[in-house]
Amino acid sequence: MVLAPTSRVEYVTPNQIGVFRNRTSMVADLAAYLDADGHGDPFFALDPAVRGTTSLYRDGVVVGMDPSPVAQFAIPSGQFRYRLSLGANGGTVLPAAARSATTWAFASRGQSDVPTAVPLLVLGYDAPQTPAGILRGVTMTVTVGPQPDAVIGRVGTCSVAVSTDGAVTWRAAAVRAAGTVGAASGFRVTIPRVPVGSALTVLVRAADDRGSSVEQVLYDALRIG
């Protein structure tokens, strides 16, 4: 499985998770360790062996930082550009891809006292694997869509790169549009040739035409047989 941060509410019922804001605050309540089928545990962040930090920036200036995937920040009501970062490290508590770094960028204005979902782009991964955790073949699907209740633009770009040396050097993967998966845009990814037995770190960047973007690094996320 490919563990990654998500805000897909159906994975953690009845809890409403995601990133929401009203006139005066923004709340990030993210599941840091789930795969595309909801495997994993969103509450691993409560384990003392698991480390993570959530940071929020407004127009390039830090608003605050919190050592958890669950955080609340005081913000003004005007229109601003925000950058939200989540770094997570499961150490030896979690299996592959327990370490990740995700940065979302989006514009938001607080016009209501009722919490509203911000236009966050959420990534998903469909990477069929053997029982031993080896990727079947050399392809996988990446999906890019809105967090629940959010409105985003048309997803126009998605790029993927892989590394076999822990994100020191990168090789671009071939990416082509693959239709839609529910509310998300699908992209078929062909991984470049790498040595058998390699552990792949995966870097995905995606953006829509309304200024929202996401960049996600999943360390040692896949193994090539």
Image: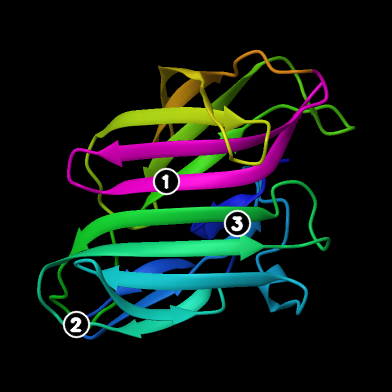
Give the residue drawn at x 35%, y 83%: 73
> What mark, if any, has residue 215 been given in the picture?
1
Estimate the x, y position of residue 191 in percent, counting from the top left.
60, 19
User: Looking at numbered disc 1 in the image, what kind of residue is underneath it?
Assistant: Glu
Of residues 122 and 204, the one nearer the viewer is 204
The magenta region covers 196-225
Q: Secondary structure at mark 2?
A: loop
Of residues 176 and 21, the one nearer the viewer is 176
Which picture quadrant has residue 145? top left
Q: Which residue is mark 2?
A: 23
- Looking at the image, is 157 positioned above or below residue 146? above
Estimate the x, y position of residue 123 in percent, counting from the top left.
48, 43
Residue 119 visible in the current orientation: no
Mark 3 → mark 2, Cα distance in angstroms? 28 Å
Q: Main secondary structure of the magenta part?
A: strand
User: Looking at numbered disc 2 in the image, what kind of residue is underneath it?
Assistant: Arg
Can residue 222 be found in the magenta stretch? yes
Estimate the x, y position of residue 155 in percent, counting from the top left.
29, 34
Mark 3 vs 1, N-terminal side: 3
Which picture quadrant has residue 207? top left
> What mark, if any, has residue 11 been given in the picture?
3
